[in-house]
Amino acid sequence: MSRADGRTPEQLRPIAFHRGWLDHAEGSVLVEFGRTRVLVAASVTEGVPRWRKGSGLGWVTAEYSMLPRATHTRGDREAVKGRIGGRTHEISRLIGRSLRAVVDYKALGENTIQLDCDVLQADGGTRTAAITGAYVALADAVTWARENKLLKAKAEPLTGSVAAVSVGIIDGIPMLDLPYEEDVRAETDMNIVCTGDGRFVEVQGTAEGEPFDRDLLNRLIDLGAAGCAELTLLQQIALEETRA
Amino acid sequence: MSRADGRTPEQLRPIAFHRGWLDHAEGSVLVEFGRTRVLVAASVTEGVPRWRKGSGLGWVTAEYSMLPRATHTRGDREAVKGRIGGRTHEISRLIGRSLRAVVDYKALGENTIQLDCDVLQADGGTRTAAITGAYVALADAVTWARENKLLKAKAEPLTGSVAAVSVGIIDGIPMLDLPYEEDVRAETDMNIVCTGDGRFVEVQGTAEGEPFDRDLLNRLIDLGAAGCAELTLLQQIALEETRA
Amino acid sequence: MSRADGRTPEQLRPIAFHRGWLDHAEGSVLVEFGRTRVLVAASVTEGVPRWRKGSGLGWVTAEYSMLPRATHTRGDREAVKGRIGGRTHEISRLIGRSLRAVVDYKALGENTIQLDCDVLQADGGTRTAAITGAYVALADAVTWARENKLLKAKAEPLTGSVAAVSVGIIDGIPMLDLPYEEDVRAETDMNIVCTGDGRFVEVQGTAEGEPFDRDLLNRLIDLGAAGCAELTLLQQIALEETRA
Amino acid sequence: MSRADGRTPEQLRPIAFHRGWLDHAEGSVLVEFGRTRVLVAASVTEGVPRWRKGSGLGWVTAEYSMLPRATHTRGDREAVKGRIGGRTHEISRLIGRSLRAVVDYKALGENTIQLDCDVLQADGGTRTAAITGAYVALADAVTWARENKLLKAKAEPLTGSVAAVSVGIIDGIPMLDLPYEEDVRAETDMNIVCTGDGRFVEVQGTAEGEPFDRDLLNRLIDLGAAGCAELTLLQQIALEETRA
Amino acid sequence: MSRADGRTPEQLRPIAFHRGWLDHAEGSVLVEFGRTRVLVAASVTEGVPRWRKGSGLGWVTAEYSMLPRATHTRGDREAVKGRIGGRTHEISRLIGRSLRAVVDYKALGENTIQLDCDVLQADGGTRTAAITGAYVALADAVTWARENKLLKAKAEPLTGSVAAVSVGIIDGIPMLDLPYEEDVRAETDMNIVCTGDGRFVEVQGTAEGEPFDRDLLNRLIDLGAAGCAELTLLQQIALEETRA
Amino acid sequence: MSRADGRTPEQLRPIAFHRGWLDHAEGSVLVEFGRTRVLVAASVTEGVPRWRKGSGLGWVTAEYSMLPRATHTRGDREAVKGRIGGRTHEISRLIGRSLRAVVDYKALGENTIQLDCDVLQADGGTRTAAITGAYVALADAVTWARENKLLKAKAEPLTGSVAAVSVGIIDGIPMLDLPYEEDVRAETDMNIVCTGDGRFVEVQGTAEGEPFDRDLLNRLIDLGAAGCAELTLLQQIALEETRA
């Protein structure tokens, strides 16, 4: 059974990482999962938030946002509404937690890396694209920090890599990396975040329609883990290229 | 291996449902998971939000909040800060989704049930206690709606029951229903929401420390599903009692 | 002339103080004036707000809030609306002022006691129940502070007790401690806050319908003062019991 | 015993009403109680708030605010802080209630009068000056409404007049109409709002220092009632002058 | 061709400066441009904002606001809406920039002067009246600072004076100092801010209807510069009078 | 005299228009003025805001925002701060006014075009790049509206084109199109918005340092007008290309 865009159920959309897309940021990437496009900027600052001062430990945090016309119909700006919506908060927290899973705060020292993930165009899977891209921007930011002597010699703040992908059940079939039109049809929607060595950082599954049984749950987790492994490879390839 | 409160790893804390704790609400319950105490009020109103009018379908929604001194040290009120925090938003959304998984909107008709879950005392597992208690309050609110002729004859808005529990890995051992002191020590933290017939509504697992592998993930899911099954039984018993 | 609930005009509703209702708070009480139920938590912290540092003086402050379904029909949460309403502000200020009237800041030393008064169920007189209960929670918090060596030897931060009650004129007759259904019918509504030795801390009377004359004003004040004296006695009895 | 400004304890400060101070407002007055200067604008609009539509009844409401440099040292603007303070809310509500005490909603018909009381300079007693001035602006606005045929023939929306004054105990002596320097020294502070026929609309007394006994309370009420009677006379004189 | 109020196109409205209108402020003026009335208070405080500390330089800033009934129909308060509107922000920034153009921060030393411009009545040209009046209040505040020894001997924080006026094209004719009724009809609207020696601080022109050509632009600038020169003279006269 | 980037004083930076950069928006362009990069999305919706309904007239409005890491150092998100800053408000209003200057509301009919201008990277002149790009996106959105039959036959909602550029005085020399490093050094900063036929829509000049005289003002206006003429040509070329 093939999908609207011709993919098999276990196939990713075309993935692209445009590293160094910004001139000022210490790390940046424009990541594409099909037509989903997220601009990630990693900002390195010396020092940490007040509650962490003097601990010798660094900090990594993330903020997610969507441009008003990233979507098919325009949404109001959260800045204009004067409050961050629940979905935005939830995704920002997820991205931060996911990246922190591969950070060695001690090796980072008292430096902060802020990851800004702005969705320029949304076509499903924006949070998983953001996490996958954020790892690439974070890696470049760490390189920058090392080159600029913010890290101690031989310190390696990254203990591994992290990637994320969505999976869902459509007409009873588990499918990988759902675009918007599949996402709205999915009976169950799951986001899987894995480290590069295949372990799990986050597993979030939600029955949108019927509750799902243990067998489907297993198949979704397997599919997501395989997708993350593939993304890990693509991240490595991207990071091996000489940055523009 | 036993736990600080003497439980085995697969044992729930003492669970209590005080139905009809409020005089005005159409359904209400003070639910206790050990020292965690959540007051759930279910408010039934005729009519639905504007975007749903004329559809013939009902609506169920939830709000979660914590009293400032529910916790060991006092937290500032969100009303005073003028904004709802990300965690509050996230949990409110989770509770609403979980309950909606067992609601037949058509059978509910154009009525709205609002579930207010206020944590009077927090000792870990407040969101799972809230979901588990909210089902009881919802069931009572549906009974009220039936008795007050808001529903059509023979309409049954509830397609099943829903319960939730937390599980976590402590010192490598999966444990059920974590109190606060275990929660802060857990390497991985997972919330499982199941229907009464044993299917999954939500599976949310987060590695707080080390990423977890597939085997541990399976064991956590099994433990959580078993805990939900036990809570389902306790909900049934509570609902069979004559309301005060 | 008797009232809907069988009381005489000068009779209080059944009053109950459940001390130590919370496990974490330094002082706490669930106070009941008939069906009005307010949970008061007293939080003790070392130190005072910035504007008071170095003065050697302590501070006592209060916040009042109502759960959304405390009332007959659900009200929106102030945290969701993003702003505290005028009524909430006004009552919080009243509670704080009333309790501070019996506090010796010097004897308290540079410690802060925060009183959180959350109305779980409202049936008239929530502010007076809150003040009356807050005194009990405050007394327990002071005992806690003494036992935990936050106070100097022999320091007595409480110069007396404080209690409050509502009075109103219904069909020309002054009545004590109005429940909701009487409150909405009252022509004049007054809240009286007295110290245990019978002096006045606050007198707030408002003509809801007809302006009132001097004679009625005198009778209301007398009735309120008598009610406060009775509440003072009930507070003493509650505080003499060994805390659970 | 005389006061810093030479007054006797029962004497008002110089009072002035500048009617028609604004060109656009339907009623307006710049009222002075000594150096306290409040600009009151009464705005008449046809129609009432949504919750009152179709009732045939009118509405009167008030907002109080202080210019940032009304006071000895500059205060931040509430608009800049993004929230109305508790004191502002409380006073706005008091002014609205006080004026509504002399309004016959039926005679007003479905019209709204909004009273904006902006303190241009504060020297104690701003809320009582605002109420006393607001009555004058309201009376002019009612005249405007009559001349502009918004009222039915012979309808009289005002059932009387209203005036307010502060009283306080300084060094054990009750004093009338306290300026700022006396206000900060007062042991007890009371605001009295009376109708023109000498009945009470609001009585609000607060012990700032020592609680007060019944005798002092009586003397304060008497002094305030006498002050209101004098202000009633001054309002009448002001309203009899031909408006500029 | 004459105007509704009988002025020629190049004539200002009657201008008045009431210096020392407030008792507490270090400098204050009630400025009138016809029926436009703006109360400006200049507050002097020792010290500067945190970002400027230790620089030896002073700071001057401004806030603009309009009373709700300054206009023909009542507008909602920004404090009630909980946010400052774009227009208010824009004008506050313009006033601050304009005044800072004639301030020598070094001579001012580490002192801050805050200019509060509150529009009591609006009839067009409120921002230009505010700037023109703010200079007068600023000059008085500087005098106060000198007399109170906040400035070094011979320090002169003002390098010149500043005045502002509006100009616009009505029916093809450039006109000076537009009242509200002309302002709404103007095809092009321009605000000119000049120093006392005839140089430009701000030039802001906006085509409300048809875009304008270079010739009209020149004529507007000439007219505005002439208006500012006249206002400069009136400011000097006002400042030469002995302050009340 | 040449500039840091090798340009002559009257030369623009490299300008690029990437039309159709977004898949969902009715018109979109990624516009570049050197390293300044602004993404403009034009959203067409049938209907107009409530205050304009039934008028037969359309509406065009704009919002400007900057990604947090568009700048050299990261800035906080306005959505997180919960309020739009004054600068953002001011620029949004400027963009909207500028575009509306070339819109025939009647020909547009009751349709709304919303222009979202998000600065992805900032290097001076973001507001002028936004206006210049917004015209291109607007033109594409109008074409889309025509093709989708939202406009009447032969209706032409655009009466011309609009472009904008910054000019400034550096070391006494007027220069065109300032990048960030020149902008901070400029003594005077001016933004000029012109229609395609060379008339003025907005002229906004500010003395950052010394006030400027009439001669410099003239030279700045001439330079800006010439820059706009050049940008108009580049807009035409971009719009003549077949859209991707």
Image (cartoon, coloured by chain):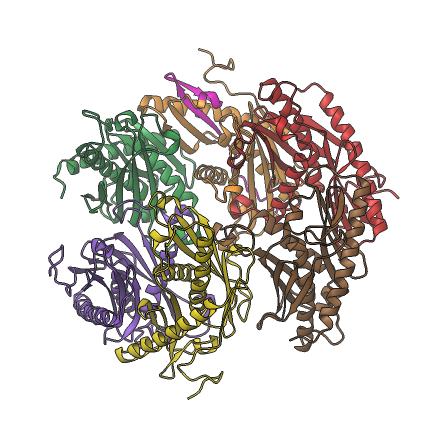
Chain colours: A orange, B green, C purple, D yellow, E brown, F red
Q: Quadrant of residue C161?
A: bottom left
Residue F114 is at least partly visible in this image: no
Q: At which x and y percent is residue A133?
A: 56, 32
Q: At which x and y percent is residue F149?
A: 58, 18
How many numbered circles does the render carry?
0
Q: Which residue shows up at 40% across the image and 32% down it? A: A203
In the image, C11 versus B93, the foreground residue is C11
Q: At which x and y percent is residue E9?
A: 75, 51
Q: Quadrant of residue B146?
A: top left
The magenta stretch spans which residues?
A153-182
Judge whether residue F120 is colored magenta: no
Is residue E134 shown left or right of residue D125?
right
Q: At which x and y percent is residue B195?
A: 26, 29
In the image, D12 versus A95, the foreground residue is D12
Judge whether residue A155 is colored magenta: yes
Q: Residue furthest right?
A: F1
In the image, B193 versus A239, the foreground residue is B193
Note whether B125 is above or below C189 in the view shown: above
Note whether D12 is above or below A83 in the view shown: below
